[in-house]
Amino acid sequence: MCIGIPMQVTGTEPGHALCEGRGERRRVNTALVGDVAAGDWLLVFLGDARERIDAERAAEVNATLDLVFGAMQGDGAGADAGFELPSRMSAEQLRQLAGH
């Protein structure tokens, strides 16, 4: 499984961005998202930026990742995640989740 990590651009190089997120720094390939600027938010998978996101979406993804990691550590934080699994969502909820 591949998990996207929200990262904020702190600097740029041709074809790459220097990013920070979730306590780490990475040099990220930006070929799939085009030119980026300091302050932009990217969803990063295995060192490649796959999607531009806004700060609100970055916060949502980070909160979800916190729940997942908490559940993996057995701290009970994920017991009431406050959301439905996609398999339990209506067609309209899935469209909203997908941004349509």
Image (tube, helix red, strand yellow):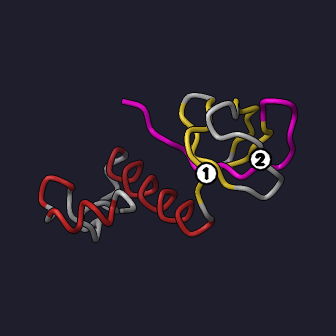
| In magenta stretch: residue 3 | yes
| In magenta stretch: residue 37 | no
Q: What stretch is highlighted in magenta?
A: 1-16
Q: Image check: 36 left or right of 91?
A: right
Question: What residue is at 41 percent from the left and 48 percent from the top?
Answer: 69
Disc number for residue 60: none
Circle nearer the N terminus (1, 2): 2
Per the model, the C-alpha gap separating discs 1 and 2 is: 9 Å
Q: Residue 3's x, y, as percent?
A: 45, 38
Per the picture, the main secondary structure of the magenta-coloured stretch is strand
* Residues marked 1 and 2 touching at CB (< 8 Å): yes
Of the residues shown, which amino acid type is indicated by label 2?
A: Val
Question: What residue is at 67 percent from the left and 55 percent from the top?
Answer: 41
Of the residues shown, which amino acid type is indicated by label 1?
A: Arg
Question: What residue is at 39 percent from the left and 61 percent from the top?
Answer: 99
In the rendered view, would you say 45 is above or below 76? above
Position of the N terminus, as image quadrant, is top left
Q: Image check: 63 left or right of 35?
A: left
Q: How crowded is mark 2: few (under 14 residues within 10 Å), some or many (20 or more)?
A: many
**Disc 1 designates what residue?**
52
Q: Residue 15's x, y, as percent?
A: 78, 30
Q: Residues within 10 Å of mark 1 (few under 14, many from 20)?
A: some
**Disc 2 designates what residue?**
36
In the rendered view, would you say 51 is above or below 31? below
